[in-house]
Amino acid sequence: HVQLVESGGGSVQVGGSLRLSCAYSGYTSFIDCMGWFRQTPGKGPEGVAAIDSDGASSYLDSMKGRFIISSDKNMLYLEMNSLKPEDTAMYYCAADYRPWVGCSFGRGQDGFAYWGQGTQVTVS
């Protein structure tokens, strides 16, 4: 129904910045919530940030003040600043269409029906 493709990952120095992008297409008219997750080996995906159809956003506490989630047309962005080594992970964008499920960074993996392939971010 919906396709998502992340880009913008790469290697950056500690304290640097990076902007991730997620292009989404297909049956997108009913998307109610979009978010970013990150995952490291041996660990489940962790919600980083989310934004709902009204533009309201939320963030994992460790990201608040450093990361900014935004959307424009059929694009989702995650601006990352003051990057730390612990931010190193595979980052995924995700989307869901169910308005009865609250849209927040704490929304679980099962709360997003559509996922991108991920983009690697390495901070060193």
Image (cartoon, rainbow, N blue to C red):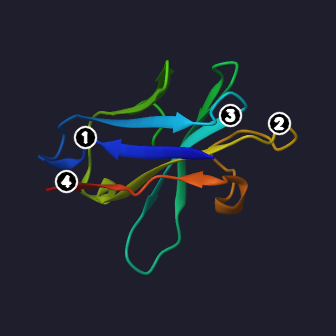
Element class at badge 1: loop
Q: From mark 1 to mark 4, how far is it between C-alphas?
A: 14 Å
Query: For mark 3, what is the residue?
Result: 31
For mark 3, does the 10 Å Cα neighbourhood hold few (<14), some (14 to 19), or many (20 or more) residues? some
Q: Amino acid at mark 2?
A: Pro
Q: From mark 4 to mark 3, how far is it between C-alphas?
A: 31 Å
Q: Earlier in the sequence, mark 3 or mark 2?
A: 3
Q: Amino acid at mark 1?
A: Gly
Circles 4 and 2, Cβ within 8 Å, touching? The answer is: no
Q: Earlier in the sequence, mark 1 or mark 3?
A: 1
Q: From mark 4 to mark 2, how far is it between C-alphas?
A: 35 Å
* Residue 114 in sight: yes
Q: Position of residue 124 (x, y in %)?
A: 14, 56
Q: Amino acid at mark 4?
A: Val
* Residue 61 in sight: no
Up-down: is 56 above or below 7?
above
Q: Earlier in the sequence, mark 2 or mark 1?
A: 1
Query: For mark 1, what is the residue?
Result: 8
Going 36% across and 45% down the picture, which residue do you hit?
Answer: 6
Going 29% across and 58% down the picture, which residue do you hit?
Answer: 88
